[in-house]
Image: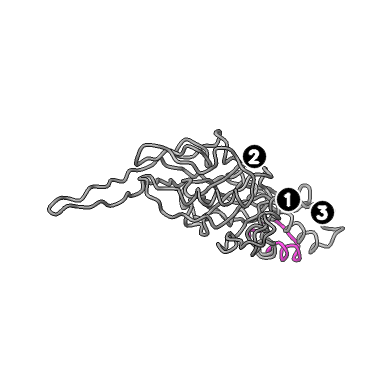
Amino acid sequence: MQLRGNFDTLTTALLANLELIMQDDMPNLSQAISLFNDVPCPGSFINHVGVTGVGRPSIRPEGTEANPVYRFPKPSTQYVPEDYSLYLQLTKELLRDIPKQVALGQSAYDVKEAHVGNKDEVLCSVLNNGFSGAYTGFDGVALFSTAHPLYGIAGTQPNRPTVGIDFSVTALQTGINSVKAMTNDQGFKKNAQAMRIVHPYQLTWIVEETIMSPDRPDTSDRSINAVNRRRMSNVELINLTDPNAWFLFPASNRQHKLFFVNKEKFNTVAEYQVLNKSTIIVTGEEFDYGFSDWYPAWGSPGSS
């Protein structure tokens, strides 16, 4: 927290603790950040360069050389952090008529909420645009596509259904099996596991009934719910724009390639404006976000 200008003692004390209020007392309004790998950016930008996977070993007859396996670089993904800032102006009349503790405390909450809400919204845009050919990744197609090119061997691979399907027990089984069928660039299955369901708030009830009930929610014969035994979790994101779209991710962020690149953490600067006798609070943070690879994420846009 930086302070500049002429403040009275009380205002100075309150502003000095403003960043602490913003950082520690605000609830975590952003769930999207929990889905991304949070990495620092020490310079102006960072590049992520992927490499092709390794194929299966083959039998080596006695006296012969082993078959060589080569790895090749994939197209890179560049992250260039941008500054997200705003400033709040508190007039002399506001600070005079409303107790400063209330005015500054509420301002802290409102400003932090604006930043957290904006961050959640921009991170959700990765999924909101995930089926659009206007937002492509390193391989030239959308994050969720039926035709991701394989760089080690010829061919393509999907991470979405050909025709969108709405969430249901059957649809979830389809998604789980599709993730298990994914291979690396050499056609080698890595036993990927779909363990997190990411969904809009409109699907919360059906998702939680599906994964949390010990009995199958789609039948009346009290069959065992095999999905419940998988111990899947769910993440509700209020800034997903399609009420029918849903996504599958592995349990750990280290197993996928969605990134939040953080160059400058949230910070505040306060300044007194002499000409209009107001207090200015400037807040900002610098980051970029996106995906460096699609594997092993899976998504469906729903049927409508």
Q: Which residue is mark 1?
A: 88
Mark 3 nearby-residue class (10 Å; few <14, some 14–19, many ≥20): few
Question: Marks 2 and 1, how far apart in space?
Answer: 43 Å
| Residue topped by disc 2 | 303
Quadrant for the N terminus, please: bottom right
Mark 1 residue element: strand
Image quadrant occupied by the C terminus: top right
Q: Out of 119 and 68, give the one closest to the viewer.
A: 68
x then y, percent, for residue 218: 67, 54
Whether the magenta-drawn stretch holds residue 139 is answered as no
How far across and down, in percent of the image, does residue 11 sit? 75, 62
Residue 94 in sight in this render: yes
Q: Which residues are magenta?
A: 1-18
Type of the residue with mark 3: Lys
What is the crowding at mark 2: few (fewer than 14 residues within 10 Å), some, or many (at least 20)?
few
Image location of residue 143, percent across then percent down: 52, 42
Whether residue 261 is visible to the viewer of this picture, yes or no, is: no
